[in-house]
Image: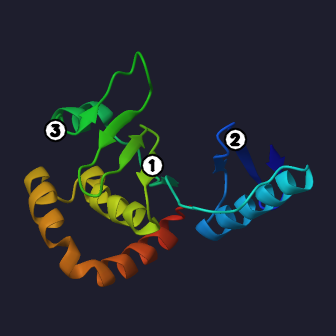
């Protein structure tokens, strides 16, 4: 089932559960879920809007420079998988936050698996220095993850300004 505003698609299961995809924000997702429940009620079913939760947040961005995926795969072999014959992007499985990034040679990135928006921002802030070559691997994995929680508020503001400068859409 689809609605136009917010532009979303719902998968409705016989169990009564529903998955809503395509929302641009958490609020739009909740609003769309309520609208779908109301449509189902109007069709004569006993539907109730309960147990709403965000299961997966997806973000995408373009860092505006090409990425050497072979080099990234070899330097970060513990976290990445790159099989260009099967899929054109490198799959990078970040441990903390537990986010999966699809990284393409064009500089486009898809971040998925977040439960809250801040995990997307945190994952981008951790991967950007690696992609731009400004932070050595050991520093990225060790110090950034270890110290991130202490500096999160300042980092988030800095990340937001970086995102605005490079035209990232999340």
Above/below status of 107 relative to 145 = above
Q: Secondary structure at mark 1?
A: strand
Q: Secondary structure at mark 3?
A: helix
Q: What residue appears at the point 67 percent right and 57 percent down from the top-left corner?
A: 23
Q: Left or right: 114 with respect to 69?
A: right
Q: What residue appears at the point 23 percent right and 80 percent down from the top-left corner?
A: 151
What residue sits right under mark 2 in the picture? Answer: 11
Total count of labels: 3
User: The N terminus is located in which quarter?
Assistant: top right
Q: Nearer the viewer, mark 3 or mark 1?
A: 1
What whole-number distance in Å separates the C-alpha atoms at marks 1 and 2? 19 Å
Q: Secondary structure at mark 2?
A: strand
Task: Please tell me the numbered disc located at residue 112.
Answer: 1
Q: Are marks 3 and 2 in contact (CB under 8 Å)?
A: no
Q: Is disc 1 surrounded by few (<14), some (14 to 19) or many (20+) residues within 10 Å?
A: many
What residue sits right under mark 3 in the picture? Answer: 75
Above/below status of 133 relative to 90 = below
Q: Nearer the viewer, mark 1 or mark 2?
A: 2
What whole-number distance in Å separates the C-alpha atoms at marks 3 and 1? 22 Å
Q: What residue appears at the point 30 percent right and 50 percent down from the top-left corner?
A: 131
Q: Which image quadrant is residue 41 in?
A: bottom right
What whole-number distance in Å separates the C-alpha atoms at marks 3 and 2? 40 Å
Above/below status of 22 relative to 71 = below
Q: Are marks 3 and 1 in contact (CB under 8 Å)?
A: no
Q: Nearer the viewer, mark 3 or mark 2?
A: 2
């Amino acid at each position: 089932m689809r609605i136009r505003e917010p532009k979303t698609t719902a998968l409705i299961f016989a169990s009564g559960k529903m998955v809503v995809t395509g929302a641009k924000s958490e609020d739009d997702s909740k609003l769309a879920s309520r609208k779908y429940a109301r449509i189902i009620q109007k069709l004569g079913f006993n539907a109730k809007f309960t147990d709403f939760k965000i299961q997966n947040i997806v973000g995408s961005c373009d860092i505006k420079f090409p990425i050497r995926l072979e080099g990234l795969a070899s330097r970060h072999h513990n976290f990445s998988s790159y099989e260009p014959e099967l899929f054109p992007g490198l799959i990078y499985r970040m441990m903390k936050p537990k986010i999966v990034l699809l990284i393409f040679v064009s500089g486009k990135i898809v971040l998925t698996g977040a439960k809250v928006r801040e995990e997307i921002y945190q994952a981008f802030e951790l991967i950007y220095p690696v992609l731009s070559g400004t932070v050595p691997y050991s520093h990225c994995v060790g110090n950034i993850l270890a110290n991130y929680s202490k500096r999160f508020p300042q980092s988030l503001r800095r990340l937001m300004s970086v995102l605005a400068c490079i035209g990232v859409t999340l």
